[in-house]
Structures are given as structure tokens and as C-alpha cells.
Image (spheres, rainbow, N blue to C red):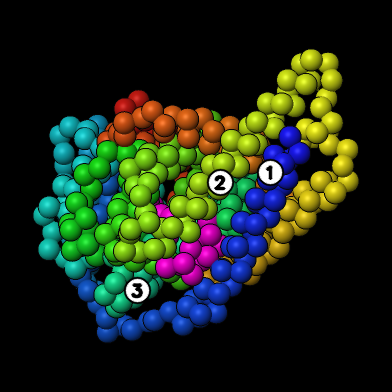
Amino acid sequence: MSWALEYVALFPAIVAVSWIVFGCLFVVRREWRLPMDDGFTPSVAVVVPAHQEELVIGATLEALLEQDYPAMEIHVVSDGSTDRTVAIAQTFADRGVVVHELATNRGKSAALQHVLDRVESDLFMVVDADTRARPDAIRTLVQQFRDPRVGGVTGHARVGNVTGVLTAVQAMEYSVIVGLAKRAEQSWGGLYTVSGAAACFRTRALREAGGWTVPTVTEDIEVSWRLQREGWRLAYDPRAVFFIQAPVRLRALWRQRRRWAQGMVEVLRMHWNVTSTPNRALIPITVQVLGAATWLIIALMVLSNAMVGMLGGSFPTDSLLGSAHADRQVMFLWTFGLFGLQALVASLFDGAHVSDGWRVFPLFVVFPVYFWIVLFPSVVLGAARGLVSSGSTRWARTERAEVLVGAPAGPEPHVRRADSGASA
């Protein structure tokens, strides 16, 4: 198992170096020069798909109505909600919010397609019902569409409900991993995925690619790959900040990451042939995803080998935890050190756009524990599920908390589970 241990140790180090290098290239070549022309105001249909969102829909709409962008219309689509979602949304009707009420629950993609079939705007923006946009977010996001090759843009998602250790670690994850990964992918010319919580698309590009019609548990990943396979570019604008709600309970987080992993595998099954794709950014992105999948398999083999040895009364000397080889231990230390450097670089970049960019930086030291307890088992099970799944159009969201996204940290909030019709 010597080679397996070395792969387990070295692959994360290679990814860290890659993200640091290409992330820095994006910042220097692009991020410092991102356009801002207040005279560029394409029309935007902002769509908030909602199912049982009475706890959060009001704050989301208030934030959207505070946007400093003139050419936008806001649509709320209640997809079979039986709570007060529609009643709350309709209180905003006199301020221009258009409310669509679907009698039966058909799923998030169907809700989005319902509006896509009815709008004539230049751009089509999706904002989750638990997401609060900073007042300049939409004005900033649309700037990327000055490039006619851009089909979709995503903003900078930040965890806004940091109320405990679990949400704080997720805030660190979004900064240190998600933000830096998107910067690196931009250097390759694309994105693994736009953020499902806040993303804007060229309406024509969405329609030409088929709209929101493909059954999958992660519609944001799937539409990202489909647009890029059609030759469109995806862009990331870290200046456009959106505050999202992260799961506050371990079980909800575990289910969320399992779903994300399932969606990743479903998308690879659908869009595996990327070699002839006009947007070649999907090639390095696919290599990265396949490398991570291989890492998961090998790490599972190493852990299984160690557990078998322990059950047999002996701890394998070549196992992940029992290796007696100093050089291998040094490799793991170097990998962790590179992750620390990645966290430092990412926090430095984020600090240019959000005032609390450094707040969660020290939590990188607990990430290995968080990874092995939460992420690793959920991703492995989700990936296995994705190998046999046939996609889904059902709603899949986590619990909502009665706390404004982006509000100051306080006592642990009351939470409500997703309704029983939502998938895991």
C-alpha cells in the first residue's frame, strides 16, 4: 500500500499548489482589472424559486429590493408551498415583485423553467430563497456580460449565519476552498459550477442549451457543464457578495454534501465526453474531478486495509495511521502546510471584498477533522449513489433557520427541517 499512501498524501498537495498558482494568476491578470461600467445595464429577471420558505423569503426579497440596479424585475415562484410563502411574497407585490404560484410541487428546475418561458429579459438570475445579496451585487455581477462569450456568472458566496463552530468551519471552507478553486478555474477559462445560491445567465444561452429541463439533484452543476459544452464561458466575480445560510446541524450538513457528491457523479455520467467541447476549460476541470474521485477510492482502500488489520489484532505498518516511515510522515506534514498556505492566500484575497475575510482563517487547523468526520463519508456515499441514480426533479434543500442571513452571531437559532417532500 506504499504507493496508495503516497497518492493520498500528495494529491491534496498538488491541488493546493495548483489552486494557489492559478488563483494568483487570476487575481493579477483579471480580478484587479474586472470591469465596472455603470452605464451597462442589461435587463435582468431575478427569480427566487421557493418551496416552504416562510422563514426566509421576506429577508431575501428585502435585500433584492435594496439593490442599486435599475433594470431588474423580481419573480418569486412558489412551487406547491403549503406554508405562508405565497402570502409573504404577495406583501411585496405593490413594490413590483411578481408572484407565481404553482399548485403542485414539481421541483426547482421546473419552477425556474416556468419563469424562463415567460420573460424577455436579457439576463436570467437565480437567487435562492435563503440568500441575501449585498446592495451592489447585481450591478457588479452583470458587468461580466460585456464579454459576448460569457453565458453565466456566479458571485462570491459567504456563509452569513455563523452561529457556532460547525457554521464557522463551513465559512472557512467557502473562503479557503470554494473561493480559491473558482479563481483557479477562471484561469483555465471556466468553472466547475456556478453557485446555485446566486448565479446569473444570459437568457439566450440558457434557452439555446435547453433551459432547466435535465433531471438531476444538482441543477447548478449540470447547467454549468451543459453551457460550457455548448461553447459558452462561465465567469466568477468575487466582488458580488451573497450571504447564504449554511446547515447548523451535522445531519443536515452531511445530507447536503452527500447530495452534492451524487450530483457530481450524475453530471460526469451525462457530460463525460469533454475532449471535443468548444470550451476546453472542462478538460482540466474534469481531470481535477477524476483525480479527486480516484483519491477518494484510494483513501477508502487505505482506511479499509487499516481497519482489517486492526480487527485482525495487528495495525498494518504500511497503513495511513501506522506508517513507520519518516519520509511519508513528512509528506503529510508538507501537505498540511501547503493547505495552511492555501488558507492564507485565500483569506488575503477574500479580505479585499469582505470586511471579515480573516475571521475564519485560523479554523483551517481543524479542517482535517471536519473532512474525515463529515465530508469523506458523505461524499463517498453520495458518489456511490450517483453511479446508479437516474436524476431527480424533486426539491432538495436543507433546513432553514429563523435568523437573517448575514446577521451578527448570536445564540443557536431555532431551525426547521426541510419538508418531507425534499430529497436528501
* Cα gap from disc 3 to disc 1, whole angstroms: 38 Å
Q: Is residue 354 visible?
A: no
Which circle marks residue 144 in the picture? 3
* Cα gap from disc 2 to disc 3, whole angstroms: 30 Å
The range drawn in magenta is: 178-197
**Furthest residue in direction top, as rendered:** 312
Which circle marks residue 326 in the picture? none
Q: Which quadrant holds residue 93?
A: bottom left
N-terminal-most mark, 1 or 2: 1
Q: Which quadrant holds residue 53?
A: top left
Depth check, front residue: 171 or 190: 190
Q: Is 52 drawn above or below residue 360 in the view shown?
A: above
Depth check, front residue: 388 or 125: 388
Dot 3: within a 10 Å radius of its alpha carbon, few (fewer than 14), some, or many (20 or more) residues? Answer: many
Secondary structure of the residue carrying tag 2 is: helix
Q: For the N terminus, which image quadrant? A: top right
Residue positioned 83% across, 25% down in the render: 315
Residue 150 lies within the magenta run = no
* Cα gap from disc 1 to disc 2, whole angstroms: 10 Å
The residue where tag 1 is placed is 8
- Three-letter amino acid code of the residue under disc 3: Gln
| Residue 233 as seen in the image, left or right of residue 363 | left
N-terminal-most mark, 2 or 3: 3
Dot 2: within a 10 Å radius of its alpha carbon, few (fewer than 14), some, or many (20 or more) residues? Answer: some
Q: Is 254 drawn above or below residue 126 in the view shown?
A: above
Secondary structure of the residue carrying tag 3 is: helix
Which of discs 3 and 1 lies nearer the camera? The answer is 1
Q: For the C terminus, which image quadrant? A: top left
The residue where tag 2 is placed is 292
Secondary structure of the residue carrying tag 1 is: helix
N-terminal-most mark, 3 or 1: 1
